[in-house]
Amino acid sequence: MLTSFKNIFETDIVSLLTPRRQLVGLDIGSSAIKLVQLKESKGRYFLQKFGVKPLEPEVIVDGTVMDEGRVVSAIRELFDESNVKNKHVAISISGHAVIVKKISLPPMPDDELEGQVRLAAEQYIPFDINEVNIDFHVLPPDPSGDAQTDMSVILVAAKKDKINELTELVKGAGLIPMVMDVDAFAIENMHAVNYPMAQEETTALVNVGASVMNVNIIRGGVSLFTRDIPLGGNRYTEAIQREMGMSYEEAEEVKKGERANEAGGAQLTNVIDSVNAEVASEIARTVDYFKTSTSNADLDRVLVCGGVARIRGLVQQLGDRMQVPVELANPFGEIDTSGSDFDQDTLADMAPLAAVGVGLALRAVGDR
């Protein structure tokens, strides 16, 4: 699904009169900023640029920007270091500032739909309706259902102040924000391109970031259920700090495996396993809730991405808990990376970080 808040940028309106413009995917996370630039040719995608710029602790805390100047500088540095000339970007939002709901509405003409969605939104959105931007997407009808049944609509509401914060950061770096997406839907776009043979499966796409974990359950190219969970890689760092008496920097290095020989093996394994169990439990609880609210809800597989996806033992523990195949997502699986500057082994190792960025880079101005 290609979702954008089209009422945010005037550029979206004028762009409908111009040729399709490819965008740079810019993923502004709590622990790092990632960019992805793709090129499309004859139905195939080619990786042109991929870059990651780590952020210092306390620059972005739980999705809240604490040091705007540093974020702007980091974005500039990332574009300069990656030698990216295209200034038009797609960005995304997640966490407590965005609400995604699947709602039902009676069949109605298109010219009445927007007004009815806005009325319905007031029932489902826990924010002042004047403080959010609203977008929606009508899902395809169930081919096995009654033609007269209600329409299923994905309703998305994002807080205007968060949107403005992100767009001002991007503009401050000299870039032009063209599309605003949602992290969970960006990963859905990534999945559609890289897993063409699995589109009819029921798949849980799990993106584990530093402070937020996105779960998006999809089937047939349609999002069935989404949830953002305020839990992520920072929980591992905090646990290692607390249980092993380390500084934040030391705990981060240990978490990433950069100081494995120095850290107490058995104790570290216990700490990580404990947080893995917490993460797996939240994912399993989310899937269980989905199953109770949806018919034909058996899960076929789980794909895990994000900066924490490679933490040791997580995929194994999640598989044991879920009793379905669990694997690392490969955002470059069907994308030709041979022309990029990255060493292929390094690129494969860093691929889980690129999931949101790839999904954003697949966006173009004016699409849906």
Image (cartoon, grey):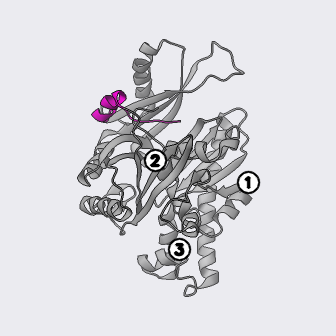
Disc 2, SS:
helix
Badge 1: how crowded within 10 Å, few (<14), some, or many (20+)?
some
What amino acid type should be assigned to the residue bearing mark 1? Answer: Pro
Spatial separation of the CA atoms under disc 3 and disc 1:
25 Å
Left or right position of 82 against 198: left
What's the magenta region?
Answer: 1-18
**Would you name the residue on which mark 1 appears?**
325
Q: Position of residue 233 (x, y in %)?
A: 50, 64
Q: Secondary structure at mark 1?
A: loop
> Residue 319: which quarter of the image?
bottom right
Q: Amino acid at mark 2?
A: Ala
Q: Quick check: 163 left or right of 114?
A: left
Residue labelled with disc 2: 361
Q: How far apart are the alpha carbons under marks 3 and 2?
A: 29 Å
- Residue tagged by mark 3? 255
| Comparing labels 1 and 2, the label whose residue is closer to the camera | 2
Work out whether mark 3 precedes mark 1 in sequence or the reverse, and give the earlier one.
Answer: 3
Mark 3 Cα-neighbour bin, 10 Å: few <14, some 14–19, many ≥20: many
Q: Residues within 10 Å of mark 2 (few under 14, many from 20)?
A: many
Residue 312, image x and y in percent? 62, 70
Distance between mark 1 and mark 2 Cα atoms: 28 Å
Compared to 185, does 86 lie above or below?
A: below
Q: In which image quadrant can residue 144 be found?
A: top right
Residue 249 is at least partly visible in this image: yes
